[in-house]
Amino acid sequence: MSELRVAVVGGGLAGLSAGLACADAGARVTLLEARPRLGGATWSTRHQGLAIDNGQHVFLRCCTAYRGFLDRIGASDLVALQSRLAIPVVAPAGRTAWLRRHPLPAPLHLAPSLARYAHVSWADRLRIAAAARKLAKLDLADPALDARSFGDWLAQSGQSPRAIELFWELVIRPTLNAGAGEASLALAAMVFQTGLLREADAADIGWARVPLEQVHAEPAARALAERGAEVVTRARVREIELRGASVAAVRLDAGRVPADAVILATPHAEAAGLLPAESGVDIRALAALASSPIVNLHVVWDRKILAHAFAAAVASPLQWIFDRTQASGLARGQYLAVSLSAAEAYVGVSSDSLRRRFEPEFRRLFPAARAARLEKLFVTSEPAATFRQAPGSQRLRAATQTRVDGLYLAGAWTDTGWPATMEGAVRSGLAAARAALAAAGRRQGLPQVAA
């Protein structure tokens, strides 16, 4: 069998997983990344003496493709994974309720925590339980779900505004990068069914113990090199060249890379600019898919104010807060990373303005912050962190296969059935690699993509 030449355009998790899967199957892989680094939306840098990530990325035990990717690149020991779900949910004055997994079968494993979830009334807790049972029965294959917002469904299911804000949004806002009122019911139902309602241990939370570049970019680059793949950074692709109805090469600013297969694993807005008309992909649909931002606050205190590895905040503009002191190399005090999802209101706002907005919120939430000194607050922003996971977005997501022979799409924005997460990105990369390899007649070593 002749050698299969695969060009992967994009060095995020989708491209890295696709490239490695193809290289593992014996293809000659060239991975092209326009930026000077790999990792895509998961990157690290140094700032004011600290090792920081662009944002806080977490995964769940049910993220089997992502966890398999970590295993493959030898990075599983660089992440932490809870032995049992436990989320401290903090309200002003330090009032804390816990969402914990109990030793009961799903979905009863969350019932004891919900019964004690004092941030909402007893009546709200009963209505939350009833809505969860109803949510578990929704048919994810029903296209009508994607036409509705999760917020509308919750209201029609008897959920009060307080219950939506203080319970449902805790899950939906960080996973879909959208508030309940702006999120697709189809994707919200998928999140709750897969993460919380079907398997008791599915929602155990994992996170990186070291900077993300050490978890993704560096070990993935080593694994690709070990398989003989070529990784080229600062390589901006200008065109996908065709020969008839098949791919022939990718053209760069300088030179070209011949290819029998091309896996386009860029963000959807960039993919729209590279896709040839012959691909059959609806470029207008990709434009309508739009993007949603995430803003991250990096906050250094002179002492420890958060007693947990992470916490979720309610009744506050603060959302999810993570202790990154050890990973950052901070020698004294505490470094907290705050992830603000669906953060349109904060994009482009100065660090000083955000400090005035959020410093009082820390002191409201955490009693230990009242006597502490905030030493630093700086900001990283991802204006196009994810595609906009709104009602109607499902029909806008592109398939892996295009009408051009040898041209495949990958990225969390493709039609994976998953939200825009690290898991969705890796699944898309594996699906594209499998399609490329199978089309070339490869039958051995095809990557598996779990349902």
Image (cartoon, rainbow, N blue to C red):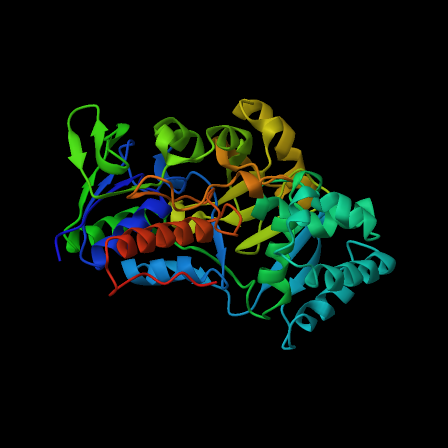
| Residue occupying image coordinates x 19% and y 40% | 259
- Determine the residue positioned at 30% across, 41% down: 38
* Nearest the eye: 439 or 211: 439
In the displayed structure, 275 sits above or below 423; it is: above
278 up-or-down from 85: above or below: above
Q: Is residue 258 left or right of residue 320?
A: left
Question: Please, which residue is most extreme toward the right here?
Answer: 123
- What residue appears at the point 33 percent right and 50 percent down from the top-left corner? 216
Measured from the top left, where is residue 138 in percent x and y? 69, 59
Residue 210 visible within the image: no
Image quadrant in which you'd find residue 269 = top left
Image spot of residue 433 (x, y percent): 31, 52
Q: Is residue 442 left or right of residue 143?
A: left
Q: Is residue 151 left or right of residue 311?
A: right
Q: Quadrant of residue 133?
A: bottom right
Query: Which residue is painted at 64% across and 65% down in the image?
Result: 197
Residue 58 is at least partly visible in this image: yes
x and y, in percent, of residue 152 in the image: 76, 44
